[in-house]
Image: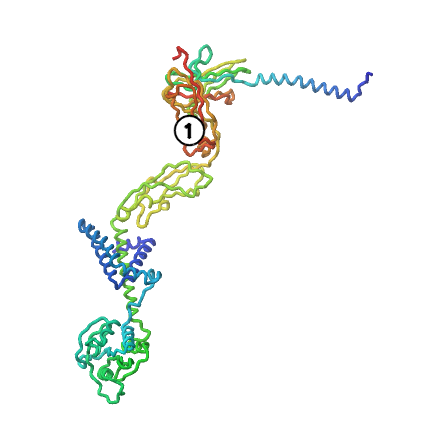
Amino acid sequence: MSAIFTQLNSIGWRDIIDILVVSYILFRLYVLFRGTYVFRVIAGIGFLWVFQRLAAYLGLIVTSWAMQGIIAFAAIIIIIVFRNEIKNVLQAKDVGAIFWGVSHKAFLTPEEIITSSVYALARKKIGALMVLPAKDDFQEVIQGGIPWQGILSKEMILSVFWPDNPAHDGAAIISGKRIGEVGAILPLSRRSDLPSSYGTRHRAALGLSEKTDALVIIVSEETGRVMIAKHGEITEIRDNLALQKSLREHGGRTADDQGARREENLKLGFAAFILIICVTGIWFSFSRGLETLASLEVPIEYQNRDPGMELLGSSLNAVKVHLSGAGPLMRSITTDQVKVRISLGKAAVGLNTFTLTQDNISLPPGVTLKKVEPQVVDVTLDIPIKKELPVQIDWIGKLADHLILESATLEPDIVSVIGGSRVLEKINTIYTEKISLDSINKTGRLSVNLALNPASLKVVEASNGKVVIVFTVKKREAGDE
Amino acid sequence: MIRLLKPHEIVAGCLLCLILTAVSLEAPAQENNGNQKHLAITQAVMCEEIKEYEPHNQAAVFSIAAGKVYCFTSFNPVPRDMFVYHSWYRRDRLITTRRLSLKTPEWSVFSTIQLRQADKGPWRVEVKDHNGGVIKIIKFSITD
């Protein structure tokens, strides 16, 4: 238990954002695709992925490999087979609906479905009789009902009362979100004070309402008028809002009661909660799984250097960074993701010693620093100055024994060099690159480069830091050799 | 025809004579001082050997095989008996300094070093007067 709390305490703000972002993406996919076949297939792929990870963990190489193949194949299948469904989800809604907002259109309450169906029937003058039971058991007073158990929908109701349907003459018993029975025969009222315009449907509705507390909706085939019968009374309903109100009152709900919506919101909230739990679990398995150690050679980056100063050198160009983290993270980590930075903002001219700490090292989320080697870095800064220095030739090799290199002059023999003041104060001569004597056998000229050491030195003059050597060679006198 | 000079013309003439006399006396004095104060170098060379008080086989590059290298310098005039210095540098690092005596009125001196394998590279000899002021720099190289 304490280990769990320790793990939870180690979660940083980046980790929380990480979990929330992934959870929200999955939640949006759920909201957009719920109720569709795509969602079921995605859920199936998710299950396959978990299975594949489990197989990999258990070392079932072939199973894991097969699962990977199936997942990859299934992902392509989803896009091809369900392209229209995906297109509908992404195109039918505005951009905002993809990223936020929840559509409740597809989740009408039974009252809304019934009302909509009743007025659709009324407009087409299709007679209908619908019974909405309350507390009383009415199975003994009705006869001949055909079990239906169909989920309530407008299309379903319209098809039940469609004139060519054999069961259209009877009553449909609607319990909750289902049509329980169709073609039910209701007991007829024996009252004699009913208007002559009332037909058998009205008498049947009234008959049941006299014997039970059920509410019966009547749609007149002749007039298309909608009426409800309850407690032995028939009332004409003028509009859909009135019918909805009556239905809600019959179901024991007030007009403001948004039970279905609340239920729907509860479902969404539960789904969001489950997703957060799942993503947190996956995150822990990724980032707080078995700890793996890794070492990287990371180059040091210097920043905030005073433009008036020059970085002459440092004791180190790179440091070894020892890191730890979850296996998958450590396997994918590269040198580019780890930065070692030293701020030279407060550095002075001369030798500066910096001790590397956690603040100098930036790591990707989920990776922790174990050690830096070495911890101390010496950095030398200097102010650039210009100095005129004589040039000298750096001959190497061997001149032929019978020859003497009598003289050698340079053009120019003095050059202006820019470099750090501390470096230049120790330099009194600039040497040429090494010039071999082996191939020299007569007087001539050579264009040579200057050997600038350290390389930070720069020659001011043009001609790309080249100088010309004019040399004179003569033969030794006989006897000198 | 003969006009007597006025007193102020006589005074001006006397002053002019005095100034001219002073100038004519000052010029030789300055020449003498220059001869006595300034040491002048007439020759400064590197050579393989000294023969009959003269540098032999002057060069800018010397082989280790030669064994020795000489720095020969001549001075004229030498205003008084004094010392000069030959400071030998290898790649800006002072290797040795030789103190050499000069005699009036003119004099030649040389210094030498024994060559070893580790001596290969660019060298220079700085010829300095008794105050340490550099009179001349001679550059050369020691090679295979």
Task: Answer above or below: position of A11 versus A177.
Answer: above
The amino acid type of the residue labelled 1 equals Asn
Chain for numbered disc 1: A
* Quadrant position of residue A217: bottom left
How far across and down, in percent of the image, does residue A190 sit? Answer: 22, 87
Disc 1 element: strand
Colouring method of the image: rainbow
Q: Is residue A387 visible?
A: yes
Q: How many badges with numbers are in the image?
A: 1
In the rendered structure, the answer to whether residue B51 lies left or right of residue A120 reads right
How far across and down, in percent of the image, does residue A393 sit? Answer: 43, 24
Q: Residue at x 42, y 30 (%)?
A: A452
* Quadrant position of residue B59: top left
Task: Answer above or below: position of A389 versus A351.
Answer: above
How far across and down, in percent of the image, does residue A161 sit? Answer: 23, 76
How far across and down, in percent of the image, does residue B111 sit? Answer: 45, 16
Residues A306 and A358: in front is: A306
* Quadrant position of residue B79: top right
Residue lying farthest to the right in this orientation: B1
Can you identify the residue that label 1 sits on?
Answer: A449
Q: Residue at x 39, y 10 (%)?
A: A479
Q: Residues within 10 Å of mark 1 (few under 14, many from 20)?
A: some
Q: Is residue B144 visible?
A: no
In the rendered structure, the answer to whether residue A307 lies left or right of residue A235 reads right
Question: Which quarter of the image is occupied by the N terminus of chain B?
Answer: top right
In the rendered structure, the answer to whether residue A199 lies left or right of residue B47 reads left
Residue lying farthest to the bottom in this orientation: A192
Question: Which quarter of the image is occupied by the C terminus of chain B?
Answer: top left
Residues A401 and A119: in front is: A119
